[in-house]
Amino acid sequence: MQLIRSLIQSPLKRITLKLDNQIGLPDESSLKYLIFAHGRSGSSTLVKIANLHPKIMLCHEPFNRRKLDLRALKYKNITNRIEKTIATIDDIEEGFNIINQKYNGFKHVIGQLKQDIEPHILTGRNYKVIFLQRRNLLQMVISSLIARKMQKWGGGAERWRKKFKQHQFKPFDIELIQKRIQGISEKIKKYKQLLKDNNIDFYNVYYEDLYGPDVSEEKKLQIINEIFEFWGVGKLKNLKYIKQAKELLDPGKYKLNSEETYKQIPNYKEIEEQCGSDETGWLFNGLDTQQPTKPIFNSSKNTYTDTSLIKPIKKYAFVFVCQEGPLEIEALFLAASLKRFLKCDYELIAAIPRPESIFGKPSEITLNLLKEMGVEIGYIYNDIVAKNPNIDFKKHRVWLMTNKLFAIKLANKLATSADKIIFLDSDMLLHKKFTGDICFSIPFNARLVPMGATMWFDGKWDQFFQLAGATMPPLRIKRTKNNDNQPSCNYIPPSFNAGFIGLHNNLVNEFSAEWIKCFNKIISQDLIDNTYFLEEITWGITMHKMQMPYNILNIDYPNLPFFHYAPKSKLKNNNKMINLMQSILKEYPSIKKIINNNHNWQFLLY
């Protein structure tokens, strides 16, 4: 069989022949698998990967150039070359009948058909649609313009770069770039709404998660297998094909553009300044590549007071602890709320503490639900706890609370492409859309420590700072509390609650090393009777020692819509949050199995 280069390309030509000759089309030949994508989203590579699966046979862009284009393929009673103009819905249906003789799915790129008939590609058929997109639409548009100017749209990175070096670029039209970004953004929204309105089962996949240089090989393969699971064909199991999938996901071999190529555009700085945004992306990840990535603390240019001088965070990593017992339930509700309302570029990470002899092990139901929600699971070994096995941890919970620091270190290890790590106490809910906030451009974010956590430390602050090798700042903050109708107050140096911590990813290693030193020195001196809040105030002392710019955070601020239900009575009296949690139970009914074993949560079942 003669196969054209546009359908089956090296190194997968041999593989596709093998599939074609040995097994042919899977039993059910109706078209049911569709990759629907916009241009420059890596869809051609995804087709090659999908065709590695023995139950998948996708046709590559049969409606390209507004024609039914199945060149060099022989069908029963069909000529060797078919090139039929697609002008009506009937033409599309005729095309489907022809494609169906050889394939059980295909790929379509937005804009390959006229606007009035293109929606018919999606409707009226029992598809399971992979909607492939790029988060960074600016890079997508620039990649498209580069390809058009070079008259080259694919191939390996080596051949692309070779031809790229032979091409001299003129300045790109800023207005054209802006119009194209707006246009593809509107089309993505339009087709997503079309899918929802027609109850078509679809799965969002993003270019950056499949081909990003900072995404682990394991994470990429996980997404590929999630696609196959969504299609209902099972994971890719053949080791040979897994190896070839890894090769196709290697950005060094197949990622065509980079900062190096973008800088060959004469007006790239103007493009970045006028076309870059948080919503549609930046050419250089929102950073001036001439500046160091570590925040400049003593710079007159970057005082963190004028938000026009700083770049917003591009990607967040949210991490929380998931521990055997009630914390499992809290972690599941938190993860589900984050998945529902986060509308930014993010990763979710659950930190499972060890040793198991102290922390136990979450149930398989919990671990499977977290995976279903797209949460990456990692394990932390709390050596602070492990080195003190004789401590009564129920009485001295401060030791267990040190899991937070190790969770942040885990996020730093797993989410290498994230700019900001945010640690959340598990007893929190995100209850409104969160797209990001300029305040997280400041290196350290946290809430003030509550009044109850300060009353034990009167007269001790100087000693704490001296033990940590830090200078106590002159600033004092008033903390107040009404106790038995008698107002009380305290004046403390800025000190923070550790239930919500934001930390720049590139500062985590240095911060964690200093924090551990600080914590060990202070707790070893036995200066106070109640050590419960000692873990928390150590965050502030470490921050002061490192002279980090900080932001006093209010998580109830409209742009940070988190609800912290400690104590649980705060939750039981909030109908809005109860309704949210009950809707999560409908979405993930398996959580009820865990709740059934915990009477403190059974109020949600009624």
Image (spheres, rainbow, N blue to C red):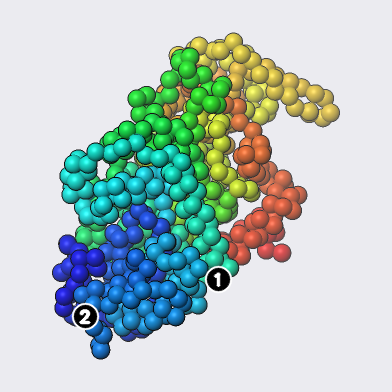
Q: Quadrant of residue 95?
A: bottom left
Within 10 Å of disc 1 (Cα), the crowding (few <14, some 14-19, many 20+) is few
User: In this rendering, is residue 150 above or below 296?
Assistant: below
> What number is the disc on residue 80?
2
Judge left or right: residue 403 versus residue 446: left
In the rendered image of this protein, does residue 590 appear above or below residue 278? Answer: below
Give the residue displayed 22% in from the left and 41% down from the top: 167
Give the labeled residue for mark 1: 199
Q: Amino acid at mark 1?
A: Asn
- Circle 1 — which element? loop
State the residue in front, 177 or 478. 177
The residue nearer to you, when weighing 145 against 189, is 145
Q: Residue furthest right?
A: 485
**Among numbered discs 2 and 1, the one appearing first in the sequence:** 2
* Image quadrant where one finds the C terminus: bottom right
Residue at the (74%, 53%) spot, across then down: 575
Mark pair 2, 1: CA separation: 37 Å
**What is the three-letter code of the residue carrying label 2?**
Asn
